Image (tube, grey):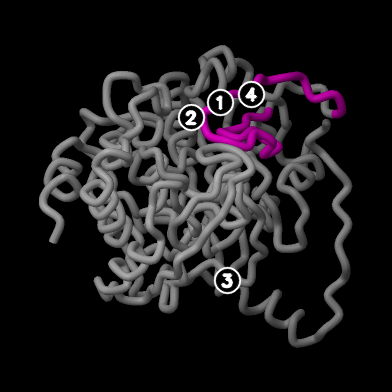
Amino acid sequence: MQIKGNFIYKELVVNSREDFMQNQRVILPIEKIEQLWPQELKNARIGALLHPASILPNYQHTLDVLNEQNGKIFQLKALFGPQHGILGHTQDNMIEWEGYLDPELGIPVYSLYGEHRQPTKAMYEGLDAILVDLQDVGARYYTFIWSLYLCMKTAEETGIHIVVCDRPNPINSKDKEGPILDLEYSSFVGLHSIPVRHGKNIGELAEQFKKECFPSVKLTVLEMENYDKSMWFDQTGLPWVLPSPNMPTLDTATVYPGMCLLEATNVSEGRGTTKPFELFGAPFIDANKFASYMNSQNFPGVIFREAYFQPTFHKGAGKICAGLQYHVLDRDIFRSFEVTISILRYLFHTYPEDFKWRTEAYEYEYDKLAIDILLGSKDYRLTEIEGKLP
């Protein structure tokens, strides 16, 4: 399978839609790369870190744009892909993929989720700059920001320039949730001390990483136009494309800052269903009592409905799982992390014989519980989840 494809899309024919698309929507830097490309990197040999959501508003992929400009403003010499692959083809987490030679472009495609997560110096050999165009979802656990972080680390070591094409944080770039990572619990789902819901777009994170971790790295952030930090993704005028296989919609991203924590348990987070992270449960749960409890907590902006599902793969595959479905009524006041901590606290105390923390390796960390890695400390689990049920 080749990365580059022919992207066919319809002309926008409705005038009001045309006006919105041209005058109101967020304009991505990749749309104006010819004008925005740093003059100091004119004709530079570049690599590009991309994934399936690296698209323009007309659904054209960033790689097509880079090919159009190849030989004009830079020379495209290599491609890099994060977790789930540059094609987005690996379904679950912790599934590696191998790099290869692109048969059409004749350039290497390097995997940053296989033998290496940090680019090697050999991968950067012959390059002057790395262009990064990735769609993040706003949570510390989502590994694309850490692929950026590690690209910056190798760039500082080699003198390579990093150019980040900024993109919106889909769950807005102002609200924050959850504890800040204790670096003793650093892993590929958290390599720097930021909150769980970090409240920044990817360009801002790049600037933070430079300031706090890689002060001598050469960094240029290409900015968006018409972007406001209070925007949710469906207010940007941009199309949603799955950044990873289990992130199908903005609704998924809205609950993800909390619900990713269920990966650290034996309770299904809804993988193998059409509503990952919105549906969750296990065969041992009494769904009716669970729904009653959660709704009695009166969390703002959300209501729960008892639900039953049978995952096609992953935890609970082929079994009927009883649990809940999120229904977010007001996303501006809803706080996924706080709600999920309440979910975990209830399950831990209500089903002490059935509910389990994941003990096998998680993101290649073998010595610490997955829940502690995700939360960013052991103390948070001990006090906020395993402490007394209110």
Please tell me whether mark 3 or mark 4 is closer to you in this view.
Answer: 4
Is 251 included in the stretch rendered in magenta? no
Q: Where is residue 146 in the image (x, y as percent from the top left)?
A: 43, 36
What kind of residue is marked 2?
Answer: Cys
Note whether 63 is above or below 288 in the view shown. above
On the question of residue 48 being in view, the answer is no
* 302 vs 105: above or below: below
Q: Which residue is drawn at 69% across and 53% down?
A: 55
For label 3, the crowd category at 10 Å Cα-Cα, with few meaning under 14, some 14 to 19 and many 20 or more, is few
Q: Are marks 2 and 1 in contact (CB under 8 Å)?
A: yes
Along the polypeptide, which appears first: circle 3 or circle 4? 4
Q: Which of 180 and 32 is in front in this view?
A: 180
Marker disc for residue 151:
2
User: Which residue in the structure is indicated by mark 1?
Assistant: 112
Q: Which residue is drawn at 45% across and 66% down?
A: 306
Residue 378: quadrant of the picture: top left
Res. 234 mark: 3
Residue 62 on image: x %, y %: 71, 47
Image coords of residue 98 (percent x, y): 66, 19
The number of numbered discs placed on residues in the rendered structure image is 4
Report the disc number at residue 97: 4
194 w.r.t. 237: above or below: above
